[in-house]
Amino acid sequence: MSRSGIENKDPYLAFARELAQEAGKAALPYFRAGVAVDHKPGKGCFDPVTRADREAEQVMRAMIGREYPDHNIKGEEFGLEDKGSEFTWVLDPIDGTRSFIMGIPVWGTIVGLTHRGKAIAGVMCQPYSSEIFSGSGQESLLEAPKGNRNLKVRRCQSLDRAALATTDIRLFANAADARAYGRLEEKVLLSRYGGDCYIYCMLAAGQIDLVVETGLADYDIAGLIPIVEGAGGIITNWEGGNAVGGGRVVAAGDAQMHKQALAILAG
């Protein structure tokens, strides 16, 4: 599917792509450039934010204000702008700010659009590698320097052959959740830490079989759900429900593996 195909088929998704791309352009000059880092108040652990985060979100908010002035906007840096709409743009200008400030290119800009609480369009842009992952829930696409291709999860029904990823087990909400993750990790072939939004896109691309995390905000996940689902994957909370609000999330390329993971996490 070509870029024009995305635009012709789903104007919301095409606009989400433009938002993520322009935000990425705003953030990229600060990458590996020694940008100053602040700590967000009210957080117990180190929660970094930079000028790049703020400027990138401002770019997206201005674009939405011009194109869809009646839509709600929810962003990590500037909160909720509630217009009473059934549509909400959910923005994470730099998902993976820790990686960003350390010069590691696995951060990205996430844009999601929800309608009545369901994620209907999502984009993740990694401007340093010039990659754009997009999804409508029915199909997903990667645009990259090597060319464009449809994304497809891989089928893996056996945990002992599975690759599992999480950003950082130290970010898990509590000790019980960390122990639950440990039970699952013991059963897989391979596990890897780090990656933030990028690991969900790698699951959609068929490189990873499972992603398990906790403590996510809505802006961390809303834009990734249509990418995973559009590639044929399944993504829910730990109870098997809608993951659009964040919290504890499980994503899998195979429905049977997703079921097994939920059972192990539940103990």
Image (cartoon, grey):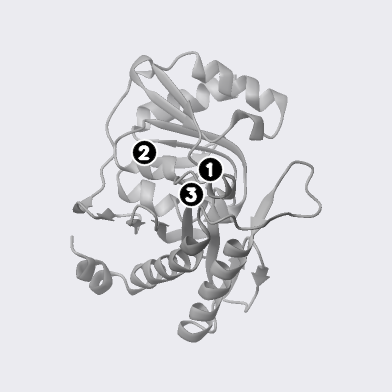
- Res. 120 image quadrant: bottom left
| Residue drawn at 32 percent across, 51 percent down | 230
Which residue is situated farthest in the front direction here? 34
Residue 135 spot, x, y in % from top left = 34, 56
For badge 3, the amino acid type reads: Trp
Label 2: which residue? Answer: 203
Left or right: 129, with 69 as reference point? left
Inspect this view and state whether residue 139 appears: no
Q: Which image quarter holds the C terminus?
A: top right
Q: Which image quarter holds the N terminus?
A: bottom left
Q: Spatial distance from mark 1 to mark 2, Cα to Cα?
A: 19 Å
Mark toward the start of the polypeptide (1 vs 3): 3
| Residue drawn at 48 percent across, 49 percent down | 107
Label 1: which residue? Answer: 241
- Is disc 1 in contact with disc 3, using a CB cutoff of under 8 Å? no
Label 3: which residue? Answer: 107
For badge 2, the amino acid type reads: Leu
Left or right: 192, with 201 as reference point? right
